[in-house]
Image (cartoon, rainbow, N blue to C red):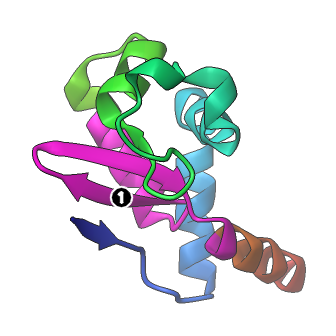
Amino acid sequence: MTTHAAPAADDTGQLVEVFKALANPVRLQVLQWLREPELHFPEESAITDPYRIGVCVSHIQAKAGLAQSTVSAYMAALQRAGLVRSTRIGKWTHYRRDEERIAQLVVALGRAL
């Protein structure tokens, strides 16, 4: 199992990356779904803890109704922005919100504005 997180740079460039990621309505919706995964993804199909490990990208893809490549690109954008973390289990990638990083970004946004 491998876990990846975005770098912890609190600068204008990072905030711009966050705004770019959130400007897409589907990416914003996915981030909202991941806030409460038990409400949005079927528990019986989960193979891991959706809060500790994350939701499988295939479940995100099914709910979004988009191509796997599109969802993977969207999740990569959210990860670059520091909004989600990924964990690879076998051939499957699971995503969860990075609540600590999101809180840091909210503080950085407050300082910037």
Determine whether the residue tagged by mark 1 lies in a helix, strand or loop.
strand
Q: Residue at x 80, y 71 (%)?
A: 106
Q: Is residue 10 left or right of residue 111?
A: left
For residue 74, what is the image quadrant? top left
* Rendered-image quadrant of the N terminus: bottom left
For residue 68, what is the image quadrant? top left
84 in magenta:
yes
Q: Most extreme residue toward the top, as rendered? A: 65
Residue 15 image point, x, y percent = 63, 71
Residue 17 image point, x, y percent = 52, 64
Q: Residue at x 45, y 48 (%)?
A: 54
- Give the residues in magenta: 72-101
Q: Residue at x 42, y 49 (%)?
A: 95
Q: Nearer the viewer, residue 11 or 98?
A: 98
Q: Is residue 57 left or right of residue 40?
A: left
Residue that carries the numbered disc 1 in the rendered image: 86
